[in-house]
Image: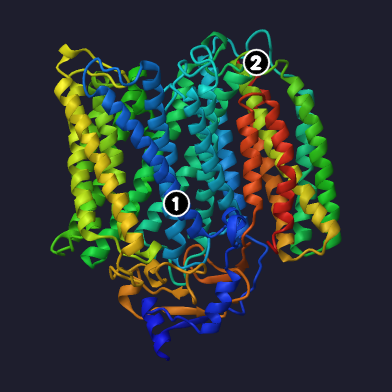
Amino acid sequence: MSAPAERLREETAGLPSGTDRERENLAYTWRKREGILGLLSSVDHKTLGARYIVTAFAFFTLGGLEALAMRIQLARPENRFLNPDLYDQVFTMHGTTMMFFFAVPVMLGIGLYFVPLMIGTRNVPFPRLNAAGYWFYLIGGLYLYASFFANGGPDAGWFSYTPLSASEFSSGHRLDAWVQIINFTEVSALIVASSLIVCIFKQRAPGMSLNRIPLFVWAMLVTMIMIVFSMPAVIFAAGSLNSDRSLGTHFFNPAEGGDHLLWQHTFWFFGHPEVYIIFLPALGMISCILSAFCRREIFGYNAMVLSLVSTGFLAFGLWVHHMFATGLPQMGQSFFTAASMMIAIPTGVQLFCWIATIWGARPRLEPPVLYVLGFFLNFLIGGMTGLMLASVPLDLQLHDTFFVVAHLHYVLIGGSLFPLLGALYYWFPKMTGRMLDRRLGILSFAVLMVGFNLTFFPMHELGMKGMPRRVYTYLPDRGWNGMNLAASIGAGLIAIAILLYVANVVKSLRRGRKAEANPWRAETLEWAAQSPPPAYNFVRLPIVASRSPLWQEELGYVTGMPTDKRELLVTHALDAAPSHREEVPGPSGIPFTFSVILCLALIGSVFSPWWLIIGSLASIPPAIAWYWTEEKP
Amino acid sequence: MSRTMDVSQLPDAVLDSRSLVWWGTIIMTVIETTVFAIAVAAFFYLRMIAHEWPPGRAGAPSLLAPTVNLLILLVSVVPAIALDRASLKRDIAGVRRMLWANLAFGTAFLVGRVFEFKALHCWWNASAYASIQWTILGLHTTNLLTSLIETAIVLAWFLAKKPEDHHFLDARLDAVFWYFVVVTWIPLYVVVFLTPRLR
């Protein structure tokens, strides 16, 4: 073997780097288009995944600015920074942005980027559909913010309860915008979910039987299946609200036999699983980080997988605990209290498995591990307050107070954002070929930890003292002043922590230390690709013989994959034995055209239902082109 | 010594449940079925809280047109199965014929759908009952239209160009999607047209 080839082999962590000719052919076959057209036509899972992540963080920034605006407003009593109307819009935009445009899409993006790499394949099964999904998401977000900046931001909270969101209390197009963006984001989530489910079942590297799938991939699989079963509920809910508002149906009009609780049921049947859709991928990330930095497999693989699966099931039996204050039958309350407490069991099992993994392992205290430790503390608090809220008498007292705000932020930021920031730190070298700066990483973690707790811990007490959520101001004699000021200072610290993180990314992209293929000496397959991975991911597809392929033996590899066609190796769902090869389409501008037309139709339908019909007809030609250009994109 | 595995001899297309598109189609039907399930749940929820179901003005839907249309749909399974088989045999002429037949049955059913809407005896904006009835029918019609457009596109390909293996798979999946349209309609027919007659 020549010296450069030897070096390349090291760069791919033991996987053979192939001949120059193989690499050249693969690079040509899987090439991207250049220029603007290339930008609009990319179908590579890594490009799309990275776009989801970057776009999601752009929305995270906007949602964060809205949070800051609220904290400035609440920093002292009777403040006049935001007027009540704008405050309503801002808290609705904050929740909508963070839930629909940051938390879910960022997880979709990470799944799209890393799942194919971790299971050893070259692309997702329906690349053009995925491209369309991303455009849906982006256009939806732009539309929402265009409305907001035109003083048309939705103002009924991120769960838009009727009758507040019905036309009698919300004329104009504010809520119409909210209803439409739900469709945009859910369609994109369903597309990614379909792709990743098929990808995980059918495209795993030979030998990666079900009991060898990395825990992160298991977490994504359960999450994607949850998306399939939960998103239809909110599509139905938003569709009904839309038709109530624009076509005169009566789903939520009690005078004609409709019911407001129908909205709450259909929304929360989606809304509660949504929380786990955000949370489960984070659990997978923690397993990745801990095994890499403890240098051992996660303790209790079977228990971990079963916990993920049972969390997925139980998450569908909890939605009514958001509705305890609506006067439910007692039997129903007891059932949903029990279910809400039960879900602590699988989460507890996972926590204990992680502790057992760390026990005696002396993990290297790199920033990703710090974020995981931060998760342990913060999420524990969030979980405990969750158990408190699951009991009906307490919930009735604390419903719609700042206690709930504290709880949900401990669960979502502590449970999801901390692991996410750790995982991005962990995977940054793979995505960019550069290492992040360790000192800046530790600093931004420390500031975040302090800022986060300073912001949200006092809110527990505020809630106990009766401060309701979603009020734009309060009187000075309530005894809420000090804690509100503390929370506002904490929010500033969170902003500084995020700025430090971003500064670290920007600095490291330019001047960071070059990353080798496997800088953390981790065990999963994404580290066998170069950093950053080429468009085709692996010159030769890996063969797996254990749960920790890069730790165990020299990797086996597949031969005979054509280098002149975009082909995937399809394997059987259970044992991952090779079944056949299948060609997937390359770059194409059709998904972009298709999604722009459909998005315009949906946005137009806010103003006249005819737009929907015109748009549907106009989308038929691109649909035909989609089919007819399948071979030669 | 590293292990290797040669996959060059494996088939590069399959026409059955091993293929990626097959799985994608099945997941799509699962998503759509979930939408129907939610709509049916909403139907029974509204029924549960209603004082009068269906509301007096509307009365129960007529049965003649929906039942005739159901029969058309049930018979349409025959050409769908024939399409499925012809695709497996890669029989171009058979696939063309059966795609035409599917298109004809689908269109007939679509025309019948107009009379089904009429059989409800109410507009969507009359009451919550009317709204959910129209929604369920509308959702099913969306799937019906999708299936018809898909059939037309695949048929156009089979008429204009020489089909390859994966086009035969598409023709099969067209039949599979039609099975879905038929199978979901049977319980929905019961919900929309029969249950309002129950006291």
* Colour pattern of the rendering: rainbow
Compared with A30, B141 (above or below) is above
Q: Residue at x 86, y 53 (%)?
A: B97
Residue B125 numbered mark, or none? 2
Left or right position of B113 against A45: right
Left or right position of A215 against A153: left
Residue under label 1, please give it: A109
Most distant residue in the bottom direction? A1
Compared with A578, A395 (above or below) is above
Quadrant including the N terminus of chain A: bottom left
Amino acid type for the residue under numbered disc 2: Asn
Quadrant including the C terminus of chain A: bottom right
Q: Position of residue A197 (x, y in %)?
A: 50, 54
Chain at tag 2:
B
Discs 2 and 1 share one subunit: no
Indicate which label's residue lies in the foreground, 2 or 1: 1
Q: Residue at x 22, y 30 (%)?
A: A488
**Secondary structure at numbered mark 2:** loop
Amino acid type for the residue under numbered disc 1: Gly
Disc 2 crowd, CA 10 A, few/some/many (<14, 14-19, 20+):
some
Q: How many dots with numbers?
A: 2
Q: Position of residue A284 (x, y in %)?
A: 34, 54
Left or right position of A179 against A588: left
Compared with A273, B134 (above or below) is above
Q: Position of residue B11 (x, y in %)?
A: 64, 73
Left or right position of A269 against B137: left
Closest to the observer: A249 or B117? A249
Q: Position of residue A583 (x, y in %)?
A: 63, 66
